[in-house]
Image (spheres, rainbow, N blue to C red):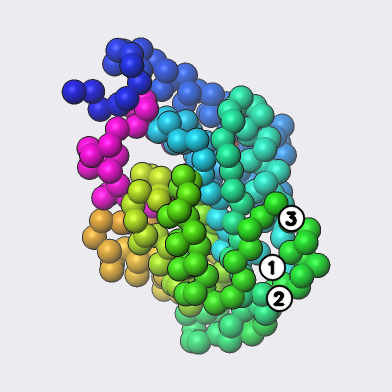
Amino acid sequence: MKNYTADITFSDALNHTNTVTLKYENINKLICNNTISTRNVMYGFGLVYAFHIAELCGYEEFDILEFGIGPVPNGLLDLKSTADKIQKVANTNFKMNIIGFDRLQGMPKPSSYKDHPEIWYENLWGVDQSTIDKAPYAKIYAGELQDTIKEYTNNLSNTNSKIGFIVFDLDQYQGTKIATEILKIDAKLLFPCLPIFLDDLYTTPLMSEFTGPYLAAKEFNDENNIRKIDLKQMNLNYTTSFLQVLDHPIRTGELQPYYPLFLKHFVPY
């Protein structure tokens, strides 16, 4: 039995995979040289992987999430603009849903050294309605993360979509710790290898594996056996991390992708 669902030979399927991979490698180069312009190239790199994986898996729809949209929705604007540009160059027709999460009143009070009180302070990066109105295409889940993640997940389970890319831009340890709970949801709602971007890992020498988002990611890995945030990507300068969804039906053999999932590292040139 084939481990993919395209009705072609393995040789033809592998050739198609290579063609798709080359297409997205070239798109990655267009982002690197600013032919496809994006305010945050890290978002562009993650989106390239999302498109690449979606096309090989045979998905038709995926969600793009950003945790922390304040003080202005530059991230949401950038995700939408960049995704549309990639879609045009890739000649695909995915339905892409832009989702934002924010408590709106800004950062919570730092709880300890883990939240970098020497940098961040309570109520920083607040968001008002006029800001949200600048991204009318985005669905904003406003409120405390532990509540909005549950609301979003319930809604997602009633759609045909899956999470294809996540940006964690919460700066502090405590918010990122809560936000990573979304990585524990039903595997069928996630991409089998989920590109993620964790901001503020090493922005200054003060940031390290002992504080902030990096510590939250490390603790996630310590607490979960079949979901792992693959942080080696950052250390290898590939810029995009991945959630390895080891219990995903495609990873266990329960389901098959449309084409073989021979993915490639796209290096920032």
Q: Does the magenta segment cover residue 197? A: no
Give 211 or 264, whichever is nearer the viewer: 264
Distance Cα–Cα, label 2 vs label 3:
18 Å
Residue farthest toward the front in the current orientation of the protein: 158
Membership of 251 in magenta stretch: yes
What's under tag 1, amino acid-wise? Answer: Gly
Residue 136 badge: 3
The local crowd at label 2, few if under 14, some if 14 to 19, many if 20 or more residues have their Cα within 10 Å, is some
In the structure shown, which secondary structural element does the residue marked by tag 3 occupy? loop
As drawn, which residue projects farthest toward the right? 130
Secondary structure under tag 1 reads loop
Drawn side of residue 183 relative to residue 120, left or right: left
- Res 70 label: 1
- Report which quarter residue 13 is drawn in: top left
- Amino acid type for the residue under numbered disc 2: Gly
Residue 126 marker = 2
Residue 138 position, x and y percent, is: 66, 55
Q: Are marks 2 and 1 in contact (CB under 8 Å)?
A: yes
Foreground disc of the pair 1, 3: 3
The part of the chain drawn in magenta is 243-267
Q: CA distance from mark 2 to mark 1?
A: 6 Å
In the picture, the quarter occupied by the C terminus is: top right
| Nearer the observer, 221 or 165 | 165
Between residues 105 and 26, which one lies in front from this camera angle? Answer: 105
Q: What secondary structure prevails in the magenta region?
A: loop
Q: Position of residue 3 (x, y in %)?
A: 25, 27
Residue found at x 48% / y 49%: 159
Packing grade of label 3 (10 A; few <14, some 14-19, many >=20) is few
